[in-house]
Image (cartoon, helix red, strand yellow):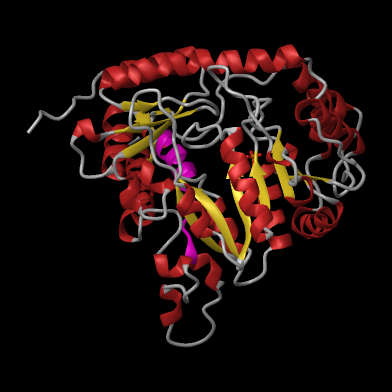
Amino acid sequence: MAERTSTKKKKARKTQASLNSSRVKSPKSPLLAKNAINGAPPNSGARSAPTGKHFLSDKVGHFTESVIREMTRQAMLYGAVNLAQGFPDFPAPAEIKQAAQRAVAADVNQYAITWGAKDLRNAIARQMGVWQGITVDPEKEITVCCGSTEAMISTLLAVCNTGDEVVIFEPFYENYGPDSVLSGAKPKFVKLRPPKEDGGEWTFDEKELRHAFDKHTKAIILNTPNNPTGKVFTRRELELIRDLCVEFDVLAITDEIYEHILYDGTEHISMVSLEGMRERTVTINGMSKTYSVTGWRVGWAVAPERITNAIRKVHDFLTVGAPAPLQDAGAMALSLPAEYYANLAKGYRVRRDHLMPALAAAGFQCFRPRGAYYVMTNISAFGYEDDVAFAKYLVQEIGVACVPGSSFYRDPRDGAKQVRFAFCKKPETLDEAARRLAKLRVAPAR
Ligand SMILES: Cc1ncc(COP(=O)(O)O)c(C=O)c1O
């Protein structure tokens, strides 16, 4: 027993050290030093090895491991309610699970076609027609990947050359910066500013966005509905981005993984549906969030034929293919009736409206999301030095895991007063989180 306790303590120290190392010693964003982002040689300790090869790629010196995924490990270590990583703790729809079981029982055990099982590609093309009004050729314009995560990196590897620039809104979903670096491109960040008043929208400065575009710009990554802000880009904003893409001959790579999770009557508009964008958009999506199966690893990229050919080549040599039986289940999932999607959005609205009052009562200022399943909050009321110190206190002492805001920004100072909570959880999980959060005390006014 004593040995088990001491192993647990050692493990706790080790995990704590890893959070510290990614959050404190090095800059706090998953992207490392700014000079690394700017393409200067990385500051790798391995370079000072006295003799021989240092074995590591320079690229990996440019970013740290995911803070989001690290917070899940912290939650497990401290027995905290995990409102950090965005995965549901409730079951996936029974009919989808049964479709997967049937596929395994029918011996769908071998590699699917590299760019995706035909039935799934047909279903994706059909639904792009229904949801976006876009005609897609399933034989030539779709690549099924291991999650939208692989679809994004395969796309960037397929389109970027060293020295190309990729425009990214910040706060950003953690993967985009490292994805750009791995593909040899330099990320250029444009700020989304939090709403000034309750219930307001995150906005960007048009001049700042234009300034980010130049002759080196290869692509813009656009995530709508957005993680972590919950922003859903409006038609006007999309048209503005479209005009810049056309003017500067830039590709739009859109991450639309939360397309069906929308609130307050907000409409999701796909960039590819805008006039002039069909030939310069890669639309990325997947099963993870829409069907509550983040562990299945099925996603896809829809792009014009020439770009698809390049994405397929990269994808083939990265992973060969996504899990075959789960692609069969994917084809079935995409055939669910419209009612399924309406209920999905309704269920998440109920969860959002469950967590937000509890956060507000505990002292957080919440930025009301219009889509996706996260709420960004301001933590100024608690008087902590920064978001990392606060997140550590929350996971260790209060028993709730969140994601420190700085992990969504290039400059950690921009997120030092923010943390993100995920509400893709059962009511009892949210109740337990609320019970624990009620122990928080705001700092006395100075
Ligand atoms: C914006 C965004 N894109 C992509 C992903 C990962 O998607 P997948 O599971 O399809 O790889 C996530 C997961 O949280 C996400 O928030």
Q: Main secondary structure of the magenta part?
A: helix
Residue 273, position as x, y percentages in the image: 74, 37
- Farthest residue in the left direction? 446
Residue at position x 41%, y 73% from top? 43
Residue in the image at 52% along x and 27% along y? 373
Dividing the image into 4 quarters, which one contains the N terminus? top left
User: Residue 66 colored magenta?
Assistant: yes
**Magenta extent:** 62-76
Tell me residue 156's x, y (percent). Answer: 67, 58
Residue 425 shown in magenta? no
In the foreground, 329 or 443: 443
Q: Quadrant of residue 292?
A: top right
The C terminus, quarter of image: top left
The quarter of the picture showing ligand 1:
top right
On screen, residue 132 above or below 20: above
Q: Is residue 99 visible?
A: yes
Q: Nearer the viewer, residue 53 or 43?
A: 43
Image position, residue 377 (x, y; %): 35, 31
